[in-house]
Amino acid sequence: MIMLAANFFWRGLPVDVVVPVGRQPKQKALDWLTGFCTENRRLLVYQIGEEWFAFGPTAFQTDIAGRLGRGETPWGD
């Protein structure tokens, strides 16, 4: 995985972006990362194949899904 730590902020919280090296991140690494984000009040956007996913509160997930639905990047260029 390639991790862009605090690539952007959402409502004052850092958002880490993870892109896999290969098709998808290994499940063990993804599990560790989501645990780390939970413990440290960080949000996460990650990619599996061509699809993006958001990890964090429901409002964050909805916002990221909306951006993607409008054809924007998850970080809202």
Image (cartoon, rainbow, N blue to C red):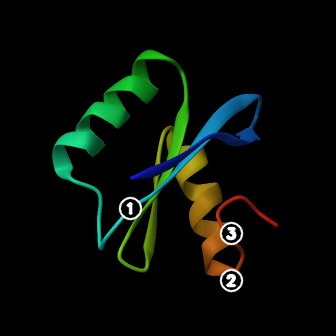
Residue 21 picture quarter: bottom left
Packing grade of label 2 (10 A; few <14, some 14-19, many >=20) is: few
Work out whether mark 2 precedes mark 1 in sequence or the reverse, and give the earlier one. Answer: 1
Marks 2 and 1, Cα distance to the nearest angstrom? 21 Å
Residue type highlighted by circle 3:
Arg
Packing grade of label 3 (10 A; few <14, some 14-19, many >=20) is: some
Where is mark 2, residue-wise? 71
Q: Residue at x 62, y 79 (%)?
A: 69
Packing grade of label 1 (10 A; few <14, some 14-19, many >=20) is: some
For the C terminus, the image quarter is bottom right
Is residue 47 depicted above or below 8 in this figure?
Answer: below
Mark closer to the observer (3, 1) = 1
**Circle 1 — which element?**
loop
Work out whether residue 39 or residue 19 is closer to the camera in this orientation and state it.
19
Where is mark 1, residue-wise? 20
Q: Is residue 53 left or right of residue 14?
A: left
Residue type highlighted by circle 2:
Gly
Residue type highlighted by circle 1:
Pro
Work out whether mark 3 precedes mark 1 in sequence or the reverse, and give the earlier one. Answer: 1
Is residue 48 depicted above or below 64 in this figure?
Answer: below
Where is mark 3, residue-wise? 67
Is residue 44 depicted above or below 52 in this figure?
Answer: above
Q: Residue at x 39, y 24 (%)?
A: 36
